[in-house]
Amino acid sequence: MTKTLKIGGGAGFLDDRIEPALDILENADVDFLMLEHLAERTLALLQEAKRSGKPGHVANLRYRMETLLPPAAEKGVRIVSNLGGADPIGAAEVVRSVAAEKGLDHLKVAAVTGDDITELVRALDPVLVETGKKLSDLGTPLICANAYIGAFQMKEALDAGADVVLAGRVADPALAVAPLAHHFGWETDDYDKLALGTMAGHMLECAGHATGGNFADGGKRVVPDLDRLGFPIAEVDEDGVVITKTITSGGLVDRHVVRQQLLYELGDPGDYQTPDVVMDISGVAAIDKGPDRVHLSGVRGRKRPNQLKVLCGVDNGWLGTAEISYGGWNAAGRAKLAGEIVTKRLRRDKKVSNLPLRVDVIGVNSVFLFGNPREDMLDARLRFCVRAPDQETAQHALAEAETLATNGPAGGGGKTQSLRRTIRTFATFLPRDQIQPEWQMVH
């Protein structure tokens, strides 16, 4: 066993760039590649796809494996990912197919299941964190419910020799905790060590966040070669973790970038609860150790929670969005007038008069609602959004956007519309002994 394990963070969301992951495989000496692809709503969409007869795994799974599997296999790099989505076994079968096509039949592929507890949640009707009321009180259909499970089923698969492990909903940092626990032999009560692994995973889970993505501020905070942004690598030993990147990529790894990601979505820094451990980063030191190298140490861990977080996806109707641009002097004033016209027309229409409606001028009040249009703005774009219970009603409301061309202010053009079904997520917590994740090797 080597004293240091190196893990590359190869993805941070569903459609993340694949070039940085390939760069890590080609230009770094890593042991594992971690691919994190599931945002909160993504899995609900995949559950719906699976129930309608479509693949329940991430749509670009085959392309990613065709690209990444050969160089990973050549270097002996093992892959751990939540690309399994709503169908980890089906995803594993796709990977086996790709491996066969590439002459890599020897690779072992495992699937982790058990996070889908939709029927259990439907039966228990638990209280939701956001509302303080039972799930059924929402009055909308439950699409799916998935528990955030931890690292140890993935660890067991790695212990059994899996080269690729595909899961569905797992806690994002667990994708790094699993290979670390496998490599160092950590147990479920090695709290400080599991916290170290969780910190490493947290630094990798958003990929480019740890190398300067979502950090640059045009001339004020400069990230070199952001167009070639690389993804992070965690070099972990039992005393700490070094965050770095390849020398062939752009981006920046310094203590400022690293601390920003360290606190990202963390809530209480002293009480970050995951399925594997409660992490406390309040005493963590981030020290620059040379160009694009930051050492993190001082993390502490406590016993894992007795409950697991469960994410419930419910139907949230249809969202219709329409936009139109105005140009020339007082463009923003004319865009604002167009918004007032649409609002009045929709409020008179009995079919849509009670629907939630938002109207704003992009660049004026689309982010900060208190903005006012200026006469010297020569380019403005009106956007209005409506939420409806069904597609037909949403489409009916959007029709008013088309009428602005000849029934609205002067100088309008560039109309666009979009219509999509939406899902809303709510959280609840259930005793971990009610949730039974498992793994299997897929042949």
Image (cartoon, rainbow, N blue to C red):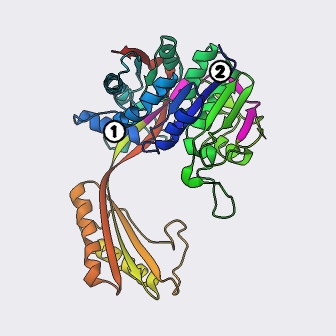
| Number of numbered discs | 2
Q: Is residue 244 above or below residue 97?
A: below
Residue 136 visible, this orientation:
no
Closer to the chain start, of discs 1 and 2, is: 1
In the image, residue 17 lies at what x, y percent? 47, 45
Q: Is residue 296 above or below residue 108?
A: below
Q: State the image quarter where residue 95 is shown.
A: top left
- Front in this rendered view, residue 333 or 214: 214
On-image quarter of the N terminus: top right
Residue highlighted by disc 1: 59
1 and 2 marks in contact (CB < 8 Å) = no
Q: Is residue 305 magenta?
A: yes
Which residue type does callout 1 highlight? Ala
250 to the left or right of 386: right
Residue highlighted by disc 2: 303
Q: Is residue 17 magenta?
A: no
In the image, residue 115 lies at what x, y percent? 42, 25
In the image, residue 308 lies at what x, y percent? 51, 27
Residue 72 visible, this orientation:
yes
In the image, residue 260 lies at what x, y percent? 67, 47
Q: Which residues are magenta?
A: 293-311
Q: Residue at x 55, y 22 (%)?
A: 178
- Front in this rendered view, residue 435 or 68: 68
Which residue type does callout 2 highlight? Lys
381 to the left or right of 226: left
